[in-house]
Image (tube, rainbow, N blue to C red):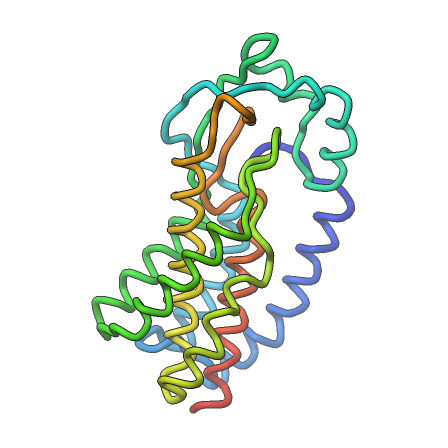
Amino acid sequence: MRGYTNSSEIRTYAAFVLILLPTAALCYKGQLSLGTIGSVPLMIFLFSMICGSIIEIPVTSFRSRKPEQLFKYAPILEDIYSVPMVKELSIGKERVFDTTLTVNLGGAILPALATIYLLLTQPNNTALEIMLIVVVAVILLSEIMAGIGTIIPEYIGLIALPFALIVAPGNAASITFIAGVGGILIGNIISVITFNKERTGSAFMSIGGAGTFKSIYVTTIIASLVSYFIH
């Protein structure tokens, strides 16, 4: 975790918890699932994502540009995105960040493992095809914001839902999860790999963390709730 939580972030997590409580009750009653992930494992998975979202695992480091205007707007960005921008401006040299690339446990590793598990236990070409659509959408609609990292629209994973309902309504929950979450993660990775480090940068870049976790968690919750209607 990047070590900063403001009131806006607290409200967001409070909303997730309020949604999670009745969702957990439905899981306890055996009314929700994600393909071969049953109700109880799904309940544990949803709680683990929330808890794991505070854990960032460093992977590698590189240098990226520290835009001059960032010093002016750092306090505003810090308040909006719950990232300790003012403190992070001291990382690296005067005009260059020593950027650390991290992978978020709750927003990347756990969802990726669940996606792989579903693909291995119930191979689905339709899910992979829809995932490509989500990947393209993420690449087109996401942005690399100086000092923050990748910003992905929170509801972008739901692009997978109508496609899943059209082509495989009986399996829409798992397809929405696989295509939505998998597409967001792949798009996130591509965006981080390909962004112009000479133009902008950040002290930290996260896969599945700040700027991305909300979109992944919203997709997971919605995909889980969809299974209620197709049981």
Residue name at image x 54 percent, y 24 percent: 199
Rendered view: 214 above or below 55: below
Residue name at image x 42 percent, y 85 percent: 166
Quarter of the image containing the C terminus? bottom left
| Residue nearest the viewer, comparing 30 with 74 | 74
Residue name at image x 58 percent, y 45 percent: 151
Rendered view: 150 above or below 182: above
| Residue nearest the viewer, comparing 171 with 231 | 171
Tally of marks: 0
Q: Position of residue 122 (x, y in %)?
A: 24, 75
Q: Position of residue 74 (x, y in %)?
A: 73, 27
Going by the picture, which residue comes out furthest to the top? 94
Rendered view: 58 above or below 7: above
Residue 61's image quarter? top left
Q: Position of residue 53 (x, y in %)?
A: 52, 47
**116 left or right, relative to 15:** left
| Residue nearest the viewer, comparing 132 with 26 | 132
Residue name at image x 42 percent, y 40 percent: 103
Rendered view: 13 above or below 226: above
Q: Position of residue 66 (x, y in %)?
A: 59, 19
Quarter of the image containing the N terminus? top right
**59 left or right, relative to 48:** left
Residue 207's image quarter? top left
| Residue nearest the viewer, comparing 31 with 218 | 218
